[in-house]
């Protein structure tokens, strides 16, 4: 299997506590995961807890406790950070980690904006300008920029995230993975992305959209094979299929209700749109209602969803559908309590990953 066809696996760790984050990340590296992703949230989502550590501080701490695993955000936005500040944060992590940083970026979510009255206007256009600026800051010195949202005069950052990969060659920039599922955001992938990171797509939809991105990349004069196809997905695995499904059903329904468009694509009508997480925030006092409305969804919604639920053999079968659709980097959020995350990820690494690691 050549490098282009290599299938990679990443794990998204918990927001908190630090002791578990460190344990899971170091165990993931030892188990053979390729990347570790941390949510970039001001507050987490949950029923009982909303704790979240700052993402770039957390990843930098992990950088000095790991040696080879890639370190990424899943994902950052450009509302809370000016693009120059974000470019510096990422460059700092990249230098300290020895070239292991990945910038995951998206158009933003309510949990990071609503409580702080940060305006959520023109998210795609604003993010696109920010990406253009970040690219320039990592590759140019003293440039001016005049956009609709950002203006810079003789802007630069030093040091750049330029890491030696041999005695004579440097990797000039940090890979940017763009979270994208709409036509506008997929175009952003084609123009600026080193990776594409959609979430919770069906394999058939994934294959169709990947072709669109590659066609657009050609139109922008870019090598479509230079864009790494990834996919963020929820996974619940165990040795007993029925027990694993039963345990995860309530949580899976809550996750689905927070993304009502996914429910609609599956052919069902969401019982409520009040818990949509992109533009709305579920505050603690709303958690009970969120749980109650989510349980009105039939079990068949979960069964038809893109979530991977069942035994390791079930996971292999489902993942293989996405590999055939073109995905080469799976970013996995294991649907278990933080205390069980290390054991579950170990099971996945031992029983699932080797199937896709043959030469």
Image (tube, rainbow, N blue to C red):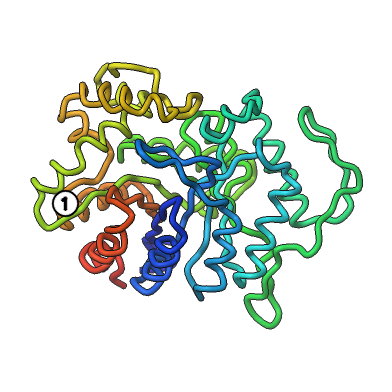
What is the tally of numbered marks visible in this picture?
Answer: 1
User: Looking at the rendering, in which quadrant would you find the C terminus?
Assistant: bottom left
Q: Quadrant of the N terminus?
A: bottom left
Identify which residue, 257 or 218, lies in the foreground: 257
Q: Secondary structure at mark 1?
A: helix
Q: Looking at the picture, does residue 172 appear above or below residue 226?
A: below
Left or right: 279 with respect to 84?
left
Q: Position of residue 42 (x, y in %)?
A: 55, 41
Residue 209 picture quarter = top left
Residue 35 visible in the current orientation: no
Q: Position of residue 74 (x, y in %)?
A: 49, 48
Q: Is residue 127 left or right of residue 189?
A: right
Q: Is residue 168 found left or right of 46 in the rendered image?
A: right
Position in image of residue 52 (x %, y %): 50, 47
Is 21 in front, or is 149? 21
Q: Is residue 171 above or below residue 132?
A: below
- Residue 12 placement, left or right of 303: right
- Which residue lies at the image location 34% right of the left edge and 45% below the top edge? 233
Looking at this view, name the residue that lies furthest to the bottom: 167
Q: Residue at x 47, y 68 (%)?
A: 69
Image point 52% across, 66% down: which residue?
62
Quadrant of the rendered image containing residue 157: bottom right
Rendering coords of residue 279 (x, y %): 51, 24
| Above-or-below relation of 202 to 288 | below
For label 1, the residue is 314
Mark 1 closeness class: few <14, some 14–19, many ≥20 residues within 10 Å = some
Q: Between residues 87 and 6, which one lies in front from this camera angle?
A: 87
Between 16 and 353, the residue placed more toward the observer is: 16
Would residue 56 be seen by someone viewing this image from the given angle?
A: yes
């Amino acid at each position: 299997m050549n490098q282009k066809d290599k299938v990679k696996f990443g794990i998204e760790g918990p927001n908190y506590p630090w002791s578990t984050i460190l344990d899971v990340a170091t165990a993931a590296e030892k188990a053979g995961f390729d990347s570790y992703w941390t949510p970039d949230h001001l507050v987490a989502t949950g029923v009982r807890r909303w704790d979240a550590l700052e993402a770039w501080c957390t990843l930098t701490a992990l950088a000095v406790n790991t040696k080879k695993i890639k370190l990424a955000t899943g994902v950052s936005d450009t509302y809370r950070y000016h693009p120059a500040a974000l470019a510096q944060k990422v460059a700092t992590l990249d230098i300290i980690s020895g070239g292991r940083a990945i910038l995951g970026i998206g158009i933003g979510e309510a949990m990071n904006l609503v409580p702080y009255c940060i305006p959520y206007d023109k998210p795609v256009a604003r993010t696109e300008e920010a990406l253009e600026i970040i690219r320039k800051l990592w590759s140019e010195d003293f440039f001016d920029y005049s956009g609709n949202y950002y203006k810079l005069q003789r802007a630069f950052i030093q040091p750049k995230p330029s890491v030696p990969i041999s005695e004579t060659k440097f990797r000039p920039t940090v890979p940017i993975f763009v979270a994208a599922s709409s036509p506008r955001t997929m175009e952003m992938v084609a123009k600026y992305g080193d990776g594409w990171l959609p979430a919770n797509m069906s394999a058939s939809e994934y294959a169709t959209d990947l072709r669109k991105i590659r066609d657009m990349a050609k139109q922008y004069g870019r090598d479509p094979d230079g864009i790494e196809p990834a996919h963020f997905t929820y996974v619940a695995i165990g040795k007993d299929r029925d027990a694993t499904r039963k345990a995860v059903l309530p949580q899976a329904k809550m996750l689905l209700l927070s993304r009502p468009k996914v429910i609609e694509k599956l052919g069902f009508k969401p019982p409520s749109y009040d818990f949509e997480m992109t533009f709305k925030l579920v505050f603690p006092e709303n958690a009970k209602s969120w749980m109650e409305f989510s349980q009105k969804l039939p079990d068949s919604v979960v069964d038809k969803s893109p979530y991977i639920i069942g035994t390791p053999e079930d996971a292999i079968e489902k993942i293989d559908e996405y590999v055939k659709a073109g995905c080469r980097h799976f970013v996995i959020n294991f649907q278990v309590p933080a205390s069980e995350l290390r054991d579950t990820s170990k099971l996945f690494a031992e029983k699932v990953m080797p199937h896709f690691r043959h030469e």
